[in-house]
Amino acid sequence: MSFDYDLFVIGGGSGGVRAARIASAEGKARVGLAEEYRMGGTCVIRGCVPKKLMVYASEYPGMIADARAYGWKVEAGAFDWAQFRSQLEAELTRLENAYRGTLRNAGVETFDLRATVVDAHTVALADGRRFTAKHILIATGGRPFVPDLPGAELAVTSNEIFHLDALPKRALVVGGGYIASEFACILNGLGVEVSQYYRGAQILRGFDDEARGHVATAMQASGVTIHCGTDVLRLEKTATGIRAVATDGTEREFDLVMYATGRKPNSSGLGLEALGVELGRNGEIKVDDWSQTAVPSIYAVGDVTDRINLTPVAIREGHAFADTVFKGEPRKADHELVASAVFTQPELGTVGLSEEAAQAQEPIEVYVASFRAMQTLFAGRQDRVLMKLIVSQQSRKVLGCHIVGPGAGEMIQLVGIAVKMGATKEDFDRTVAVHPTMSEELVTMRNPVRRS
Ligand code: NDP
């Protein structure tokens, strides 16, 4: 049987674009790709990239204050949100075009339309066209989830936050995960008065407890008011803003309420269930280690499969799929020891097991260094850097590393290589320090603070 395409990809985000490019350029496949919104997906258009640019923008007031301590006669002045927003939009358009160029150069045919799956080998575009494909890849990502509460429509999510007409004076961020904590810091840095409500006992659940505590303390010290054990019961429009009635009995008014209470896989309405593609409780597409669904011609990668919801992971999954199916080089995406960073202020970089998870697995030693960094100490800041290694007592391998402080995201990428290679504490110790740096503390921790 002959098909219109060897591969049809639904979704032009990180995972879908990588798979399409490799299948076409290196696997010599005929590839079509449909995207209903903007090419580049969540990461490029309304996630990692614009978020990181907002992080940069929000860090300047602190830098200017530090500069004064170093002898510079400078004033921060006012932040021009409209200027930043239009420059941000220009950058996202540039990146979107770069993605389109990459696909074009790779020979992928793109369609700016929503696509659904009709049968195991057929996709339908929103304009009625139908194409057959030997393989179909679902790479539709996820979308923000807002719980069903009265007044939920008054809140924005990470989808809208980059498009605000003006910055609010008072903002409430709901949630305690990556996005909530990052945006609480960003808005705070931009001069907004920020409250963060989180239903649990401490933000950033799942990360190392000590590191979470360190981040939360530093966030509070820099001006974010974190209310743990607090959730919103309802939101009400008032003449002057939005009133949040909370579980702790308070009623506070804000100009902006942002919900960052998790994301859900974009799997509904694609026609998948009817075909026998299995979905999980959260709507995630169930796949095997090869990213193959229960229907052999249909694969899925990235957030829609809810494995590890990070761009570099989606890229690896898409690449492994294309290598396997179109290049005859069978390869599974590796989900072990994936390093990541939370771009709070201070940043949190992490790889491997938290102390709590490692402890549950085997006897460990914990090494901790907590200190004031030279640069900020000089500027009179109280910020402390945290570096932590979790070591197996038996194998001596470093099972986890957690860094809180400036540049933690950059540092953890490099520590990630050593940990992935199976480095032991003794390997760290015989590495000579680079002086004077913060990261030298990683190779100069002599005695464990505890064994358990
Ligand atoms: P997370 O899953 O990280 O956090 C969701 C937060 O919302 C948790 O604090 C959760 O509480 C809370 N929550 C969930 N449901 C409700 C509810 N019904 N009512 C009140 N609170 C609720 O999701 P995010 O949206 O922050 O981010 C999604 C994913 O995107 C991340 O998991 C990550 O994989 C990725 N991401 C990565 C980034 C990075 O690498 N720097 C940046 C941004 C996103 P509880 O803890 O109690 O469940």
Image: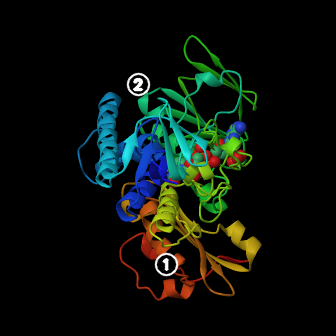
Query: Residue 162, percent across and down?
Result: 43, 34
| Secondary element type, mark 1 | helix
Query: Residue 64, percent across and down?
Result: 31, 45
Picture disc at residue 418: 1
Mark 2 is surrounded, within 10 Å at the Cα level, by few (under 14), some (14 to 19) or many (20 or more) other residues, namely few
Classify 125 as above or below 367: above
Q: Residue at x 48, y 51 (%)?
A: 3
Q: Return the residue nearer the eye: 116 or 244.
A: 116
Q: Residue at x 25, y 42 (%)?
A: 74
Tell me the mark number nearer the camera, choosing from 1 and 2: 1
Report whether 436 appears left or right of 152: left
| Secondary element type, mark 2 | loop
Question: Could one spot residue 439 in this view of the protein?
Answer: yes
Q: Residue furthest top?
A: 239
The residue at which mark 2 appears reads as: 166
Report whether 40 appears left or right of 118: left
Q: Return the residue nearer the eye: 79 or 416.
A: 416
Q: Return the residue nearer the eye: 412 or 117.
A: 117
**Marks 1 and 2, the one that precedes in the sequence:** 2
Q: Is mark 2 within 8 Å of ligand 1?
A: no
Query: Residue 322, percent across and down?
Result: 47, 62
Picture disc at residue 101: none
What's the amino acid at mark 2?
A: Ala
Classify 325 as above or below 84: below
Q: Rounded to the nearest whole Å, what is the CA distance between mark 1 and mark 2?
A: 44 Å
Proximity of marks 1 and 2: CB atoms separated by less than 8 Å: no
